[in-house]
Amino acid sequence: MTTATHFASMEAFEKGGVEIVGAESPKRYLFSNLFEVAGQSRPCERVVIAKNLEFTIECVRAEGDSPWYICSHDETVLAMEGEMTVHFIAPGDSGLRPPEDKQGAIRLGREPAGRTMGHVKMKRGHMALLPAVAAYQIRPQSLGVVLLQSIEGEESVERWAEICQH
């Protein structure tokens, strides 16, 4: 028997579910589909789809250039759909630093001053490091979906009741 691999997208995905094995209660488990979440999200909205203590996996509808962000800790970005470029700026002597009392990504009001660090081109399956204290912006070529690994912060949106099925 041959099994075919099918890659999902916002246009074509099968809604999954949770299969409980043994005596566990289904009420202890939640399940959501990242493509469905992205399809229902606003452009660049960082919707938390997984959480362990303060650590998050955030699903983002990559549509249009994202705002510029800066973070006091490393983050990672994983392209799940589409092609995009992530641009980096080192704030250097500009004085721009993430507040020490805040975790997670901090949205900047505009492109920060500083030295251009380069960019990373990404498509489905590519992962990039978003280094601490470096400003970044995601620029998709067309509609896409990314997963961001971060720490919960002001930009993290939790909508569990809307996105999860029991």
Image (cartoon, rainbow, N blue to C red):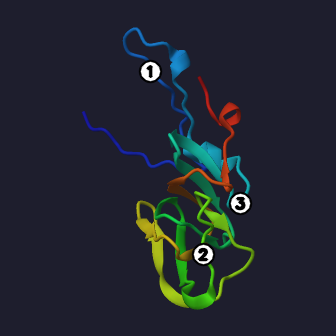
**Disc 2 residue crowd, few under 14, some 14–19, many 20+, Cα 10 Å:** some
Tell me how many marks there are.
3
Which element is circle 1 on? loop
Q: Which amino acid type is marked by label 3?
A: Pro
> Which comes before the other along the chain, label 2 or label 3?
3
| Whole-number angstrom distance, CA of label 2 to CA of label 1 | 45 Å
The residue located at (49%, 13%) in the rendering is 25
Say what secondary structure mark 2 lies in.
loop
**Mark with earlier residue (2, 1):** 1
Q: Which residue is mark 2?
A: 97
The residue where tag 1 is placed is: 19
Left or right of 153, for residue 87: left
Query: In the image, what residue type sits under mark 1?
Result: Glu
Query: In the rendered image, is residue 122 in sight?
Result: yes
- How crowded pointer 3 is (Cα within 10 Å; few <14, some 14-19, many 20+) is rated as some
Residue at numbered disc 3: 43
Q: Residues within 10 Å of mark 1 (few under 14, many from 20)?
A: few
Residue 48 on image: x %, y %: 60, 46
Residue at (62, 88) in percent of width and height: 94
Tell me the quadrant of the picture where the C terminus can be found: top right
Q: Which amino acid, by three-letter code, is at mark 2?
A: Arg
Where is the N terminus found, in terms of image quarters?
Answer: top left
Residue 114 in view, yes or no: no
Q: Position of residue 114 (x, y in %)?
A: 59, 89
Tell me the distance, in whole angstroms, between the alpha carbons under discs 2 and 3: 25 Å
In-front residue for pair 54/100: 100
Please provide percent x and percent y for residue 102: 62, 59
Q: Going 69% across and 39% down the picture, which residue do you hit?
A: 159
**In terms of secondary structure, where does tag 3 sit?**
loop
